[in-house]
Image (cartoon, rainbow, N blue to C red):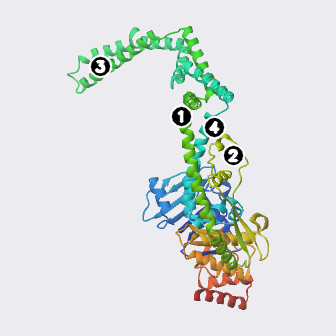
């Protein structure tokens, strides 16, 4: 549940703090007051892509902070525990800052996290339903997900998906090792050439960097030798060298060590300095004597570097990539040259996985089809309840025929001799199973059902989505549900019916609704008004929780405008009294 939302310098919001309650929370206000901006801030704090344009003019950053109670959201707690993020009494605080220079700094309970983690948590924390959600309903992939949710086949669908990925991996491996002989030989020729080129060169992980450094050393060895000689001479060889000077200093001071307290310790330090100078001089002598000026060595180094550059260009851009490519090519060549015995084992394994996949997919399909009548009946009831009497959703479950018709060698390997089994093999199977699911709408009694994308209006899509959510939640702990524009294109008793459905959802978990309809606002457990205020020549959005007379005035405004008369006020009072009594 969303407990608190704080927004700073986000669009026209300078500073806003909102405490939401359980049940039905309703936001009302004039168009353009900032209702959608608040929802945008919720999106942002949950990791949505947000440009720097949201930062309020004159500010260097925007910030959004949300506090959630996750006591009923077990998956959220598991994810955070797995990431080592502490939770205190199941409270989760998320903060995100968006800076003008483009930086975005998200934190969870004070720990810096990635936007990816926020996005992975978002579906478990907040379910935002708006125009985007309407469009998702037109995607048939969501229809299959909805059917699996209602049928309770999610785990079985996951098992089918896992088996499909195993099968696809084995199939791709088999395709690699059963290439047509000429294509296989061409590939083997290339792999042998590439491996021979890499192996004959014998690249080593750090050699390229070491050669680059050695080349620089050789190219600068002349000046380096002269500088080493001069430094060595200053320390040891010249008249009055550093070493001689330190020796003379010790001699001068030693005669007076008994006269000055503490002088002996400084004489010791001069002696120690002499040892250090001798050590440095020995190092310089060794290095200058070992320096080589061989032009032949420079040619060898440059030739080796050119060889590395060629390998990098052909096989990956770096020595590490070249070595990785070498291992990849060795594995690929081993697969292509696989023995007939290994090939037989691979085919056998693929057949076992495919058989299990087919059995699971058939079971999944049976369970999906068996639940369709119940889902269609529930959808008809819910649609009638939100003002679409006579409308029905037909859940079409189909299979796609494989155009290959078992003509490929791969498919032939699965011929079982059983006509029914062979016929099943002709259908396309994917990670979703054998079924293609689509919701078809007959908006009025006696009409034929057609695809939603062809016949459903925006208002109908809103109500269908609300009906689906009402059915699928089934009393389970859910994220906070936010509905924006769910009342698009409706009014009257239909609006009241939608409001009742929203209130029923709110009994299962927290619901937030942005609405312009008094029928929905009257049902709120917590009513907030969003409005704009001009202060110091600047406009800012404000939010206020409405109670008592303030709520009555807002209801009257929604009913009759700013100049609402006594009759409108009485109507508003009756609406609120009816809600309290229900």
Counting residues from the start of the chain, the first of labels 2 and 1 encountered is: 1
**What residue is rendered at 57% in x and 79% in y?**
525
Q: Quadrant of residue 88?
A: bottom left
Counting residues from the start of the chain, the first of labels 4 and 1 encountered is: 4
- Name the residue carrying label 1: 342
User: Which mark lies nearer to you, 1 or 3?
Assistant: 1
For residue 384, side relative to residue 66 (left or right)? right
Task: Give the Cα distance between marks 2 and 1.
Answer: 24 Å
- Name the residue carrying label 4: 175
Task: Give the Cα distance between marks 1 and 3.
Answer: 76 Å
For residue 537, side relative to residue 109 (left or right)? right
Element carrying mark 3 = helix
Foreground residue, 107 or 537?
A: 107
User: Which mark lies nearer to you, 3 or 4?
Assistant: 4
**CB within 8 Å, label 2 to label 1:** no
**What residue is rendered at 58% in x and 46% in y?**
167
Foreground residue, 250 or 405?
A: 405
The residue at the far front in this view is 417
- Name the residue carrying label 3: 271
Residue 30 pos. (x, y %)? 71, 74
The residue carrying pointer 2 sits among few (fewer than 14), some (14 to 19) or many (20 or more) residues within 10 Å by Cα, namely: some
The residue carrying pointer 3 sits among few (fewer than 14), some (14 to 19) or many (20 or more) residues within 10 Å by Cα, namely: some
Q: Quadrant of residue 215?
A: top right
Element carrying mark 4 = helix
User: Which mark lies nearer to you, 4 or 1?
Assistant: 1
Counting residues from the start of the chain, the first of labels 3 and 4 encountered is: 4
**CB within 8 Å, label 4 to label 2:** no
Inspect this view and state whether residue 555 appears.
Answer: yes
- Name the residue carrying label 2: 406
Residue 196 pos. (x, y %)? 58, 20
Element carrying mark 1 = helix
């Amino acid at each position: 549940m969303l407990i608190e939302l704080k927004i700073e310098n986000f669009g026209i919001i300078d500073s806003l703090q909102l405490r939401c309650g359980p049940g039905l929370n309703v936001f009302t206000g004039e168009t353009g007051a900032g209702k959608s901006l608040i929802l945008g801030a919720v999106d942002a704090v949950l990791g949505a892509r947000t440009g720097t344009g949201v930062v309020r003019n004159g500010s260097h950053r925007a910030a959004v902070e949300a506090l959630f109670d996750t006591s009923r959201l077990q998956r959220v707690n598991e994810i955070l525990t797995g990431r080592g993020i502490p939770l205190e009494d199941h409270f989760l605080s998320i903060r995100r800052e968006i800076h003008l220079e483009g930086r975005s700094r998200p934190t969870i309970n004070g720990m810096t996290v990635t936007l990816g983690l926020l996005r992975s948590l978002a579906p478990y924390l907040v379910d935002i339903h708006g125009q985007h959600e309407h469009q998702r309903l037109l995607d048939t992939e969501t229809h299959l997900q909805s059917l699996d949710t209602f049928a309770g086949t999610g785990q079985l669908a996951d098992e089918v998906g896992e088996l499909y990925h195993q099968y696809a991996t084995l199939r791709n491996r088999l395709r690699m090792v059963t290439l047509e002989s000429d294509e296989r030989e061409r590939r083997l020729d290339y792999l042998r050439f590439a491996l021979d080129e890499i192996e004959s060169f014998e690249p080593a992980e750090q050699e390229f960097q070491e050669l680059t450094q050695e080349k620089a050393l050789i190219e600068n060895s002349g000046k380096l030798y002269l500088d080493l000689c001069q430094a060595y001479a200053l320390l040891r060889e010249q008249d009055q060298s550093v070493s001689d000077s330190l020796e003379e200093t010790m001699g001068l001071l030693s005669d007076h060590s008994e006269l000055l307290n503490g002088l002996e310790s400084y004489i010791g330090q001069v002696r120690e300095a002499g040892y250090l100078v001798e050590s440095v001089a020995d190092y310089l002598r060794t290095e200058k004597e070992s320096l080589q000026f061989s032009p032949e060595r420079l040619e060898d180094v440059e030739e080796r570097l050119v060889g590395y550059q060629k390998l990098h260009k052909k096989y990956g851009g770096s020595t590490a990539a070249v070595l990785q490519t070498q291992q990849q090519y060795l594995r690929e060549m081993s697969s292509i040259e696989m023995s007939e015995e290994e090939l037989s084992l691979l085919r056998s394994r693929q057949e076992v996985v495919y058989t299990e996949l087919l059995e699971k997919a058939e079971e999944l399909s049976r369970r999906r089809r068996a639940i369709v009548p119940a889902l269609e009946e529930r959808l008809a009831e819910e649609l009638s309840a939100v003002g679409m009497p006579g409308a029905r959703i037909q859940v079409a479950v189909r299979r796609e025929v494989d155009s290959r018709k078992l003509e490929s060698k791969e498919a032939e390997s699965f011929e079982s001799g059983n006509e029914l089994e062979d016929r099943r093999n002709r259908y396309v199977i994917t990670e979703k199973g054998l079924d293609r699911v689509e919701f078809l709408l007959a908006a009025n009694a006696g009409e034929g059902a057609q695809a939603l994308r062809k016949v459903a209006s925006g208002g109908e899509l809103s109500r269908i989505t609300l009906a689906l959510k009402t059915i699928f939640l089934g009393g389970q702990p859910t994220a906070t549900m936010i509905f924006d524009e769910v009342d698009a294109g409706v009014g009257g008793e239909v609006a009241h019916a939608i409001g009742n459905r929203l209130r029923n959802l709110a009994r299962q978990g927290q619901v937030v609704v942005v609405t312009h309809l008094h029928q929905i606002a009257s049902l709120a457990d917590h009513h907030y008004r969003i409005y704009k205020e001009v202060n110091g020549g600047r406009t800012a959005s404000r939010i206020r929780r409405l109670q008592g007379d303030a709520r009555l005035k807002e209801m009257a405004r929604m009913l009759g405008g700013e100049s609402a008369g006594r009759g409108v006020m009485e109507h508003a009072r009756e609406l609120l009294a009816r809600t309290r009594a229900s």
